[in-house]
Image (cartoon, rainbow, N blue to C red):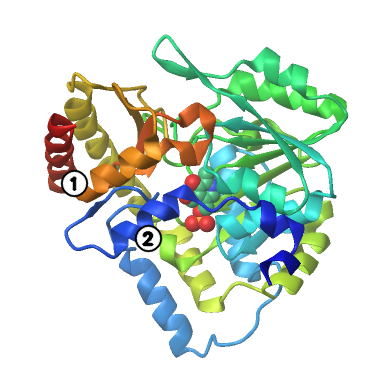
């Protein structure tokens, strides 16, 4: 039966993060640091907005591109954040960042289109473009003087008019690498020249250490540049389970994205959109609270893992992960399973994020301090026995 499924499902790679998570979630007493989410529930601002929406019979379909009031709120938010003129026509509300990526791939990719992406990276990003028929080719970040570095000249040399799009995820999951504004300027000029799309995944834009927002193409681009930005309520507003995100794109794409939404899900749920709108309008303090919490989490991890003789890592500039290596180990999936079984700590295997991250484990430090300390104690105990 499976042989009669589509070719694209044959080539699909199951997520190795899920492989660990599926084992971890069934167990008691595991400290789950393998997912990209914090341990704190979403603010009451969102909960009350959802309850009010349901109580006032927001039970019906909405426009494909999203509720006009939410599109307006997102456009205003982005205009203020990036000092640009984002309009409602630029915004498509989606049922998650993941769905924003899937719609973007459906909108842009024809069979065999070539895409360049930077790895290590969250596997879903290249995978969803592959599922749409793209041929994807990575260029790897490399460690240099204690930082993750992009070889910009090499990237530009790979980008000619045969390439359809380049995928950028900054701040990056899993390395925490942040693309500088100078790098963005150079890439934008080059892509303009060759007519290449820039797809920029900015779901961690507000989680950039020491800054309110990461450098963004949205700050330097003009409205008709071939730039599609992916965003989500999941991370900065702690709403992973609500499934709400958005696409920011040239206004010319508005009707295409609306039609694709029609044929995928019709529209995201109205009550969830109401919650997102309330968070955008009243939830800025919640973003600051999360920024503060993850700073605290990072300091704990830095102190503990940074002093461990067998552990090494590059400090992240953004997002909420540390990607660390353990002396003497290469097979990250096997190691992640061993740490889960013996130490009850869930970590994502580096192999999930491409060959450049093999030999590493990814830890999400968006957790309460005592849980992080306990996870470090457990990790110490496992490593002493290995
Ligand atoms: C880089 C990146 N993009 C997009 C997403 C998707 O987020 P969501 O689908 O929860 O909105 C994630 C989630 O981990 C991510 O790490």
Left or right: 49 in relation to 299: right
Give the class, few, some or many, for how many residues have Cα within 10 Å of label 2's Cα (few <14, many ≥20): few
Residue 114 is left or right of residue 383, and the answer is right
Q: Give the residue pinned by disc 2.
A: 22
When the figure is inspected, residue 117 is found, relative to residue 248, above or below; the finding is: above
State which quarter of the image contains the N terminus: bottom right
Q: Is the C-beta separation of discs 1 and 2 under 8 Å?
A: no
Q: In the image shown, does 327 or 243 lie closer to the viewer?
A: 327
Q: Is residue 235 left or right of residue 215?
A: left
Is 133 situated left or right of 141 in this image?
Answer: right
Q: Residue at x 58, y 56 (%)?
A: 98
Q: CA distance from mark 1 to mark 2?
A: 16 Å
Q: Which mark is residue 318?
A: none
Point out the frontmost of discs 1 and 2: 1
The residue at the point 19 percent across, 18 percent down is 309
Q: Could you tell me residue 289's position as x and y percent? A: 29, 48
Q: Earlier in the sequence, mark 1 or mark 2?
A: 2
Q: Is residue 284 visible?
A: no
Q: Residues within 10 Å of mark 1 (few under 14, many from 20)?
A: some
Q: Residue at x 53, y 37 (%)?
A: 121
Secondary structure category for the residue under label 1: helix
Q: Residue 242: x, y in percent?
A: 45, 67
Label 2: element kind: helix
């Amino acid at each position: 039966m499976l042989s009669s499924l589509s070719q694209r499902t044959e080539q699909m790679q199951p997520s190795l993060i899920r492989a660990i998570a599926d084992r971890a979630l069934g167990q008691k007493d595991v400290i789950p640091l393998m997912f990209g989410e914090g341990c704190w529930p979403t603010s009451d601002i969102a909960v009350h907005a959802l309850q009010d929406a349901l109580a006032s019979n927001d039970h019906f379909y909405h426009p494909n591109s999203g509720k006009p009031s939410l599109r307006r709120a997102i456009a205003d938010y982005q205009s203020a954040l990036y000092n640009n003129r984002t309009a409602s026509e630029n915004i498509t509300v989606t049922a998650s960042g993941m769905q924003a990526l899937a719609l973007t791939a459906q909108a842009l990719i024809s069979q065999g289109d070539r895409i360049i992406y930077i790895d290590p990276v969250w596997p879903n990003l290249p995978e969803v473009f592959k599922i749409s028929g793209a041929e994807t080719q990575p260029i790897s970040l490399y460690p240099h003087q204690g930082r993750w570095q992009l070889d910009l000249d090499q990237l530009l040399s790979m980008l000619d008019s045969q390439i359809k799009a380049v995928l950028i995820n900054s701040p990056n999951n899993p390395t925490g690498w942040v693309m500088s504004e100078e790098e963005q300027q150079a890439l934008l000029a080059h892509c303009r020249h060759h007519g290449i799309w820039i797809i920029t995944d900015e779901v961690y834009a507000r989680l950039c250490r020491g800054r309110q927002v990461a450098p963004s193409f949205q700050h330097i681009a003009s409205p008709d540049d071939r730039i599609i930005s992916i965003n989500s309520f999941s991370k900065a507003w702690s709403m992973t389970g609500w499934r709400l995100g958005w696409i920011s794109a040239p206004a010319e794409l508005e009707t295409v994205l609306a039609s694709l939404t029609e044929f995928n899900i019709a529209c995201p749920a109205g009550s969830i959109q109401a919650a997102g709108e309330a968070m955008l309008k009243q939830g800025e303090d919640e973003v600051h609270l999360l920024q503060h919490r993850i700073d605290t989490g990072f300091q704990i991890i830095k102190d503990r893992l940074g002093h461990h003789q067998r552990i090494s890592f590059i400090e992240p500039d953004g997002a909420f992960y540390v990607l660390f290596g353990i002396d003497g180990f290469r097979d990250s999936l096997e190691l992640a399973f061993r740490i889960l079984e013996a130490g009850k700590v869930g970590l994502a295997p580096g192999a999930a994020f491409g060959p450049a991250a093999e030999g590493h484990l990814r830890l999400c430090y968006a957790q309460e301090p005592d849980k992080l300390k306990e996870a470090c104690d457990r990790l110490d105990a496992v490593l002493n026995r290995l």
